Image (tube, rainbow, N blue to C red):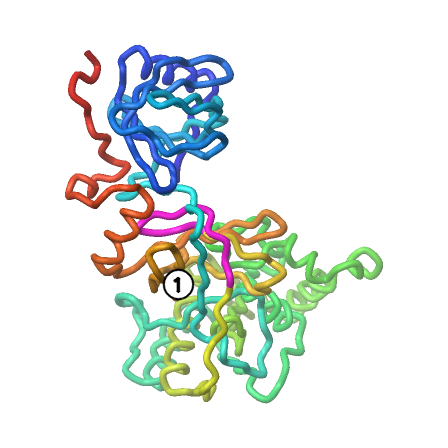
Amino acid sequence: MASTVTGVEKEFVLETARDLKTPLRVHKAGWSGDARLATVDPDRLDLELRGAAATIASWDPVAVYFDHHGTTLSFVAKARKVLEDRVSLEMPERLVRAPKRRHVRVAAPRGFSATFILANERVKLDYPESGEYVDVAPPEGPAGFDVSSMPSLVASFRQRAQSISSENAIVMWKGRVPDTLEERIVARSGKVLYIPSTSTGLPVSDPYPEGRIVTASEEEDFEGPSLFTEGSKLARLLVEKAMAGVNAEIWCPIRYYQYVVGCVRLVNSGERRIAFDLAAVDLAWEFSRILAWLLHRHDYFRTASSNPPSPRAASLVDLSPAGCLVAVSLASLQIRLQPGTLVDLELRHPGGPTSLRGRVARRYDDGRNSYYGIAFEEVRREDSERLHRLLYGKDWNPADERGESGIPVLSGANQ
C-alpha cells in the first residue's frame, strides 16, 4: 500500500528533484515519455520534456514517477498548459511512495470499456443471500483437514473441534430458513458471530482485513430501530445463555458464492469456562470454506444450468497490462465482491476485445460505487504487449519488467 509524503516534505522533495535534475517518467493514457522538473511553484509544476513531443491536452491527468534516494515516488496532476517541449501541471495534492508494481497504471484511454462475469450468476438457490460474493475454490495448501471425502473432512473437523470446545455442530439450511437470532445474523451478514465470552458480548472491531466477524455496531444495525424501543435482543440472549451455562460461542457461515447455506457452531459450556480466541474462529472459517468446496464438487446444490451468465458493465478508472481499477454502481450490483474473488473480464478498445481473468485484490466504496482493484492472472504475452502499446504508446521491451520499482536513468542525470 502506498504511503503519502507530508506537505512540507513534498515541497522539499520536489525542489530537490528540480535542483538535481532528477529524471522523471511521465505517463498519460496512450503516451509515455521522459522529463525533468524545470519549475516548482506553490500552485504549479513545469516539466521540461525530453525527446518526442507529448500528446497531452489541457486538463488531461498525467502520472509522474521518479526516484528519490532509492524510493520510487509518484503523483498524479492535471495538465494546465502544453507546449511542444514543456508541460505545466497543477501542484499535485499528494506525493506518494509508490508500491513496487511491474507496470504503471494510467487513466483508461478513450475508447476503452469493460464488462465482467461472475462464476455463478446463472445459479439461483433457495438460500439466504448475504450481499457478499465469495469464490468457491479448492483449498490452498494444508489446513489440517482430511479432504479425501466428505465423511473424512467432517471427522477431521470434529476431532480438532473437540480439543478446543465442549460442543460442535454443522447445520445446513436445506428445506428451512434460519430462525434463531444467531442464525439470522449470520445469514444476513455472511460473517462469523463471534462471542468470545457471554459475559463480554461481541467484539468492538474486526481484526481481519477482509472483514470476517460481526462487530457490536454491525449487530446493532441488524436489530435496527427496535434496539432503542425494546432494548437489545442479543444482550438479553447473552444473559440467558450465561444463566444456562453457555460460556462462549462461535456461529460461522457456510458460504456458497453469495448464498449462506448453513453454519458451523462451536460452544464452550458447563465446566469448560474457556473463552474462544481467534484461532477457534480460524478453525471454523477454514472448515466452512473447504466444506462448501466439497459440497460444490459433489453437486450438492445441483447448480447445473444452460443459461449463460449476463456480463456486468464496469467503469474503468485506471489500467495497466497487469491489472485495473473498476467502479461498479451499487445500484447495478447488489452483492459486493470479496478480495480473492475470481472474475472474467472483457476489455473493449481500439485494438479489439481482450478477454482476461483476474482476482479482486482490494475494494472500497464511496456510497454510490464499489471500487475493485483486479490483478490479472495468466495474461497471454500477445495481450500484454498489445495493452502496453495502447496504454503507453510504445512497444514492450525487457527494461519494462522493472516497472515502477526501477526508474530509468537518463544520460547526464544529476549532473
Quarter location, residue 220: bottom right
Give the vertical position of 41 relative to 34 (above or below).
Answer: above
Residue drawn where x is 33% and y is 45% of the image: 391
Q: For numbered disc 1, what is the local secondary structure?
A: strand
Query: Which residue is the extreme one toward the front?
Result: 84
- The quadrant of the image that shows the N terminus is top left
Q: Is residue 215 above or below residue 141?
A: above
Relative image position of residue 86 (x, y in whole percent):
36, 20
Among the 4 quarters of the image, the one containing residue 185: bottom right
Q: Is residue 112 left or right of residue 187?
A: left
Residue at 50%, 65% (x, y): give it: 312
What's the magenta region? 313-325
At a point 58% along the width and 57% down the height, the residue shown is 329
State left or right for residue 219 relative to residue 269: right
Q: Which residue is mark 1?
A: 346
Q: Is residue 369 magenta?
A: no
Magenta-colored stretch includes residue 322: yes
Nearest the camera: 284 or 43? 43
Callout 1, which amino acid?
A: Glu
Q: Position of residue 44 (x, y in %)?
A: 47, 18
Q: Main secondary structure of the magenta part?
A: strand
x 62%, y 86%: residue: 176
